[in-house]
Image: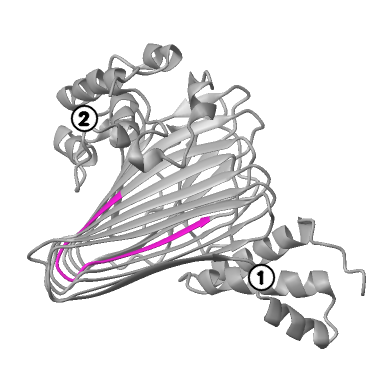
């Protein structure tokens, strides 16, 4: 297939120097100039149109909005805040918990920077499906390295605040490396907001390595914002008896594409991937997950829900790969989806690829409308139609919210979802 390469404005923005080791950055630069951005003819991008980025004319961020604050203060108990404003890291906090080390990517040694740009599984620089990771490698100048020492149990959540709020259209390509030592535990939360009204494109990559018996909880919380464009890729590599728990909650955004590549590489390791997406208006919220079971006696559980309203689109594609030597695997995946409008659209594609013979796996997807019997039941008990619909929709979302590990965040998100449902144009209850 003939590739057209990058748009001129994006090719012109490629830096001469990046945070990646020089050989890695140069190889990435050469490749992205050849393969360009992925398009809808590329299998992994068939439902995601990047036209709004290709035509965006985004400028490389200069950190001009460094004094902006998030419009939403999350109800968290004494978090460690790592703030990026228009992609520029605002510095290491002075009050880090014991066992936690934070290093600006630009100050990291070459071996650490090489680790940040060498995830497992390795993306292919020849594959257009991986072009945005390669672009991040070529363009990343800012980032951070989070190290949690062996046996450290970090109670305070480590919060990365991605704040895009410049007065012009900016693009950022940050890279984050998270390393948990043996038997360590920590929570990483991404708080994502576009404060300004100008379109902002963030193309981020997070690479996590989780040592034996360690546990990383990773929460990605995307709030509303019609100007927010996100392409984000997360890699997590699990050693023996390690755990990776992912909670991906996206309440809005103009175009959000999140991808997860989880390599369950040590016996006894386990991963959870839990998600909720609520597109409305003309928003596109897209999640792709890929779980590779590469060791015996490993488990995974994946559960995603999408509620699409107006002309919003939700996309979920989840792939579970079980390698030949990975016996005694348990892997479960479900995608349940709710359409609230005739113009809304949801695409769901669960996939299983199994090369071992001693496994217990299942997957499935459902797309439907509100349960008419449940709606009738509420109506017979005097609940007005709009309120009855709201209760059922909120209950559908709540089953995902209830799985979040932070009680204060669960309560706050419940309120956010209820507020969202209160703002939407539920049909009038003529009988009320």
Image point (27%, 18%), residue name? 34
Report if residue 305 lies within the magenta region: no
Q: In the rendered view, how is the structure colored?
A: one colour
Say which quarter of the image contains residue 205. top left
Q: Which residue is mark 2?
A: 126
- Dot placed on the residue nearer the N-terminal end, 1 or 2: 2
Q: Nearer the viewer, residue 41 or 210?
A: 41
Q: On the image, numbered disc 1 is attached to which residue?
A: 370
What's the residue at 51%, 27% (across, down)? 51
From the viewer's perspective, is 9 left or right of 109? right
Q: Is residue 127 above or below residue 384?
A: above
Mark 2: secondary structure: loop
Q: Position of residue 369 (x, y in %)?
A: 64, 66
Can residue 363 be seen at all in this image of the molecule?
yes
Residue 153 or residue 200, whichever sits in front: 200
Q: Residue at x 57, y 48 (%)?
A: 313
Does residue 35 lie above or below 77 as drawn?
A: above
Q: Where residue 17 is drawn, which disc sits there?
A: none
Instruction: Check residue 240 for magenta coloring.
Output: yes
Q: Which residues are magenta?
A: 235-249
Left or right: where 155 falls relative to 305: left
Q: Position of residue 72 (x, y in %)?
A: 63, 51
């Amino acid at each position: 297939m003939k590739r057209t390469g990058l748009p001129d404005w994006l090719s012109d923005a490629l830096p001469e120097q990046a945070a990646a080791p020089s050989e890695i950055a140069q190889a990435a630069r050469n490749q992205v100039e050849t393969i360009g951005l992925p398009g809808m003819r590329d299998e992994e991008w068939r439902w995601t149109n990047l036209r709004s980025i290709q035509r965006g004319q985004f400028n490389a961020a200069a950190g001009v909005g460094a004094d902006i604050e998030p419009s939403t203060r999350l109800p968290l108990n004494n978090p460690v805040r790592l703030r990026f404003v228009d992609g520029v890291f605002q510095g290491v906090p002075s009050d880090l918990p014991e066992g936690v080390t934070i290093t600006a990517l630009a100050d990291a040694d070459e071996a650490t920077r090489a680790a940040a740009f060498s995830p497992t599984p390795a993306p292919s620089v020849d594959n257009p499906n991986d072009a945005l990771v390669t672009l991040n490698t070529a363009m990343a100048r800012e980032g951070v390295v989070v190290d949690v020492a062996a046996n450290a149990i970090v109670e305070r959540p480590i919060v990365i605040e991605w704040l895009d709020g410049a007065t012009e259209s900016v693009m950022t390509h940050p890279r984050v490396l998270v390393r948990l030592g043996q038997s360590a535990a920590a929570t990483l939360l991404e708080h994502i907001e576009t404060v300004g009204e100008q379109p902002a494109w963030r193309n981020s990559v997070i690479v996590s390595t989780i040592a034996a018996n360690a546990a990383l909880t990773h929460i990605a919380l995307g709030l509303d914002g019609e100007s927010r464009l996100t392409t984000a890729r997360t890699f997590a590599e699990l050693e023996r008896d390690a755990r990776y728990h992912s909670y991906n909650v996206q309440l809005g955004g103009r175009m959000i594409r999140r991808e997860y590549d989880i390599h369950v590489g040590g016996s006894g390791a386990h991963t959870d991937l839990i998600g909720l997406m609520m597109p409305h208006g003309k928003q596109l919220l897209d999640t792709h997950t890929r779980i590779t079971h590469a060791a015996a006696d490993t488990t995974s559980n994946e559960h995603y829900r999408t509620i699409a309203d107006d002309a919003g689109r939700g996309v979920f594609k989840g792939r579970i790969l079980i390698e030949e030597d990975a016996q005694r695997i348990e892997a479960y995946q479900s995608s349940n989806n709710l359409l609230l409008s005739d113009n809304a659209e949801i695409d769901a594609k669960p996939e299983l690829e199994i090369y071992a013979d001693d496994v217990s796996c299942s997957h499935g997807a459902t797309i439907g409308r509100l349960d008419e019997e449940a709606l009738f039941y509420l109506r017979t008990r005097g609940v007005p139609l709009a309120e009855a619909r709201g209760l059922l929709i909120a209950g559908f979302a709540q089953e995902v919210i209830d799985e979040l590990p932070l009680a204060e965040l669960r309560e706050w998100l419940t309120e956010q979802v209820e507020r969202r449902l209160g703002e939407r144009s539920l049909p009038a209850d003529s009988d009320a």
